[in-house]
Image: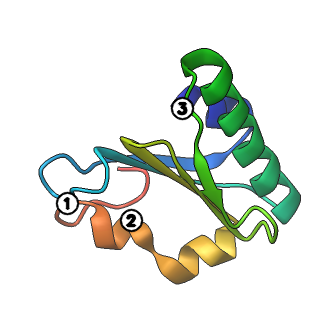
Amino acid sequence: MLASVDDDKAEDIVQIDLRGRSDVADYMVICSGRSSRQVAAISEKLAERLKDAFRIVVKMEGKETGDWVLIDSGDVIVHVFRPEVRDFYQLEKMWMPGSAHRGA
């Protein structure tokens, strides 16, 4: 998943280990696209790659607007944001342990 979003030029990619902290997923990946179009494209490509490589059919929400797309692949949840939407919600602050922050 990380390679897929990186290949599609996602920015500020963060992986958060949720094991033992959430029953929803084991990992969360948060990244940004520069525009609504890029957010949608990153999300679509990731869904295609997961289906082709691992036969995982993901659940996806938010692709229509392209501000924030949530991709649920089961054990890993991926959030793809436009930068200003990501700054508004600040999911990293909510989920990262201690005082860790983006780029740490």
Indicate which disc residue 56 carries.
none
Question: Could you give the CA–CA distance between mark 1 and mark 2, rounded to whole angstroms?
Answer: 9 Å
Seen from the viewer's position, the closer of residues 27 and 48 is 48
CB contact under 8 Å: marks 3 and 1: no
Query: Which of the marked residues, 3 or 1, is nearer the chain's N terminus?
Result: 3
Question: Could you give the CA–CA distance between mark 3 and mark 2, rounded to whole angstroms?
Answer: 18 Å
Indicate which disc residue 97 carries.
1
Badge 3 element: loop
Q: Residues within 10 Å of mark 3 (few under 14, many from 20)?
A: some
Q: Amino acid at mark 1?
A: Pro
Badge 2 element: helix
Seen from the viewer's position, the closer of residues 32 and 52 is 52
Q: Amino acid at mark 3?
A: Met
The scheme the figure's colours follow is rainbow
Indicate which disc residue 1 carries.
3
The quadrant where residue 75 appears: top left
Residue bearing mark 2: 92
Q: Is residue 23 above or below residue 54?
A: below
Q: Residue at x 73, y 71 (%)?
A: 67
Q: Amino acid at mark 2?
A: Glu
Seen from the viewer's position, the closer of residues 84 and 48 is 48
Q: Residue at x 59, y 36 (%)?
A: 57
